[in-house]
Amino acid sequence: MYPKISVVLPVYKVEKYLKRCIQSICVQTYRNLEIILVDDGSPDSCPEICDELAKCDSRIRVIHKENGGLSDARNVGTAYATGEYITFVDSDDDVTETYVEYLYGLIKKYDCKMALCTHTVCFENGKRIIYGDGTDECLDAQKCLERMLYHDVIDTSAWGKLYLTDMARKISYPKGKLFEDIGTTYRFFIESGKIACGYQSQYFYMIRDNSIVNGSFNPHKLDMLEMTDQMARTVEKRYPQLSRAVLRRRVYARFSTLNQMLDVKGYQKERKEIIHFIKENQRQILKDEKAPGRDKIAIRLLNLGYPLYRIAWKLRK
C-alpha cells in the first residue's frame, strides 16, 4: 500500500494561474494524495476557485484563513496534513504528472527521509531553462549543503522536495519573512542526514515580473541577508569545513540584494554596508575555485566603481 502524501499549496492572488496548478496535481500518477489548498485571505476570486475545485476532487481540502504570509500558510497546511510525506507547490507554478511519483520513488530507492528534483525555469516570453541531466544519487547533508551554497544545481526552494511530515512539523517557516526557504531548507538537509537527489526536471517554476521575488524593491527584500546569515551561522558551526562555501553564499546574497536596489533611491546606508562586505571578503571568493565565474566577474566590475557596475548589470538583464 502506497502511503498518503500531502501536497500543500499556499494560495494568494493567483487567480490567473490557480486552476492550471491544481489540475497538474490532480492528474498525478501517484494517486494516494491529499491536496491542501490554504487560502491565505486572498482578496481576488481564489477562495471561490478553491471551493469550486474541491467539489470536483474528494482529495482536495480547502482551508480559509486570514492573511499571514507565505510562511504562515505553509505552516498551517503542514499542521492540517495527514499524509506520511509532504511536499509544497507554489500556486502560480505547476508540475509534471509524475512529480510526486518521482520524488517518492527516490525516497524508496535510497531509503531516505527526503528527496528533491530539479526544475524548469519558465519565462513569460516562452523561454525555458531546464536543469538536470536525468541522473540521481544519494548525498549526505554536508555535500548537499555545499552544492546548495555554491548554487550547483541544488537550491534552497521549498518546492521540488518531498519529506516526512513529522520532520516538517519540527521545522517551521519563519512567519513574516521573505526568502523564508533560505532560512529553512538547510535545516531539512541537516535533519535528514542523507538526501535522495534526482536531477530530472519535474517542476515548472514560473518567472513573473510581479512576483514576490521579482517585484519592485521594498525593505522586506533585505530579509535575504538575514535569512542567509542565519543559515551561515548554523551551517558553519556544524560543518566548519564548509566555511568557504558559506562565505560565498553570503557574498552572493549581497550581490543579489544590491542588484535589486539599482534603481531605488535611498537605502544609502544599506547599500554602503553591502558593498563593504563584498569588498572585505572579495579575496577569498576570487581564490575559491568552486565559486561561480559570475561572482568573480561581479567583484571585478564592482572594484571599477559602483556606477559602472550598475550599468553593466542593467545591460546584462
Image (tube, rainbow, N blue to C red):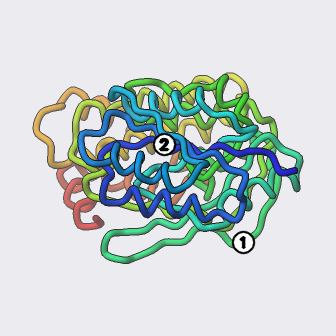
Under mark 2, the amino acid is: Leu
**SS for callout 2:** strand
Q: In the rendered structure, which amino acid carries the disc numbered 1? A: Gly
The residue positioned farthest toward the left in the image shown: 265
* Image position, residue 28 (x, y; %): 64, 63
Q: Residue at x 50, y 62 (%)?
A: 23
Residue at 21% from the left image edge and 26% from the top image edge: 269
Q: Regarding mark 1 in the picture, which secondary structure is present there? A: loop
Mark 2 vs mark 1: which is more N-terminal? Answer: 2
Q: Quick check: can you spot residue 283?
A: no
Q: Nearer the viewer, residue 217 or 293?
A: 217
Mark 1 lies on residue: 134
Horizontal and vertical percent position of residue 106: 80, 56
Q: Residue at x 49, y 57 (%)?
A: 22
Quadrant in the picture for the C terminus = bottom left
Please name which of the two marks, 2 or 1, marks the residue nearer to the observer: 2
> How many dots with numbers?
2
**View extreme (bottom): residue:** 126
The residue tagged 2 is 37
Please identify the quarter of the rendering in which residue 135 is found. Answer: bottom right
